Image: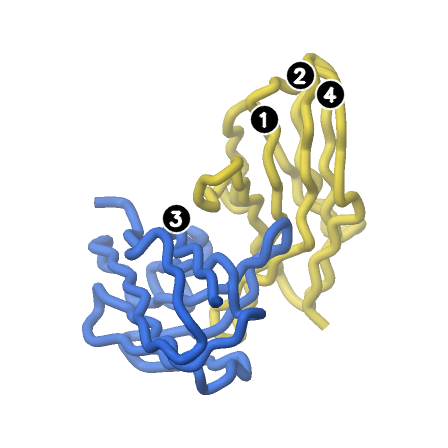
Chain colours: A yellow, B blue
């Protein structure tokens, strides 16, 4: 079964603290994984693709096939990082994106 | 143009009304999608169009009727909706169904309230 699990509904950290949003997946084959971010009252935006191994807004994510994980990390959280974060898996069966339940990140001053 | 544009942004409709949501993109994407999103929940896939043909219908009730008049436009026709259908309706596009390595581009959504 294809599934994405984000175990934390809410993650609260102080400004300047490191942050890690967890994502685990279940997929047979080579997965294509993404992180999307949704700021309050804004559209879903693509934050990262594992395939490009990029760093956006200080966030990075590494695919760990052994642990079937794609955790999102940032060394120093900023207040403007407060948002809902969704991990997503691309299913080649129909080209669907399968989303995790989301983690709400709250960065306190 | 690198955006997906959705209209209207807000819609209030009665349970006997007929209305339509519109989505437009000019990125040359050949796959377009309708998602439904409830507050603080992930988007749920409703329909997938590939090269203007319906390829996936995720068992959506017939009161939702999609239409893809051309490669740039996607409509969602609504009729006899229920209050539980109130949600944010998102349109998205991708290069094609297999070119999803680049991810989807989402519109800002239509916030629908059924009264």
**Chain under callout 4:** A
| Chain-order first, disc 4 or disc 2 | 4
**Side of A102 where B57 appears, left or right:** left
Mark 2 vs mark 1: same chain? yes
Residue toward you, B75 or B93: B75
**Residue on which the image places disc 1:** A81
Q: In terms of depth relative to the viewer, which is nearer, B115 or B95?
A: B115
Residue plotted at (50% across, 29% down): A56
Q: Nearer the viewer, mark 4 or mark 1?
A: 1
Q: Are marks 4 and 2 on the same chain?
A: yes
Please tell me which residue is depicted at 52% across the width and 75% down the height of the picture: B82
User: Which class describes the residues within 10 Å of circle 1: few (<14), some (14-19), or many (20+)?
Assistant: some
The reply to whether label 2 and label 3 mark residues of one chain is no
Mark 3 — residue? B108
- What residue is pinned by disc 2? A76
- Disc 4/disc 1 C-alpha distance (Å): 12 Å
């Amino acid at each position: 079964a294809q599934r994405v699990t984000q175990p934390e509904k809410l993650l609260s950290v102080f400004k300047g603290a490191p942050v890690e949003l967890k994502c685990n997946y279940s997929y047979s084959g080579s997965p294509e994984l993404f992180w999307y971010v949704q700021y309050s009252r804004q559209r879903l935006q693509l934050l990262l693709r594992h395939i490009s191994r990029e760093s956006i807004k200080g966030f990075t994510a590494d695919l760990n096939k052994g642990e079937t994980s794609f955790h999102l990390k940032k060394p120093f959280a900023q207040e403007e990082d407060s948002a809902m974060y969704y991990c997503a898996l691309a299913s080649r069966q129909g080209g669907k994106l399968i989303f995790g339940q989301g983690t709400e990140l709250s960065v306190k001053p | 143009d690198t955006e997906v544009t959705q209209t209207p942004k807000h819609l209030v409709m009665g349970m006997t009304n007929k209305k339509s949501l519109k989505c437009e993109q000019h990125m040359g994407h050949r796959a377009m999608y309708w998602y439904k999103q409830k507050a603080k929940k992930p988007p749920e896939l409703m329909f997938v169009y590939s090269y203007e043909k319906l390829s996936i219908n995720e068992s959506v009730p017939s009161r939702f009727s999609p239409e893809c008049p051309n490669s740039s436009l996607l409509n969602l026709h609504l009729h006899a909706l229920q209050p539980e259908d109130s949600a944010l309706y998102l349109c998205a596009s991708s290069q094609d169904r297999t070119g999803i390595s680049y991810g989807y581009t989402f519109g800002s959504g239509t916030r629908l309230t059924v009264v």
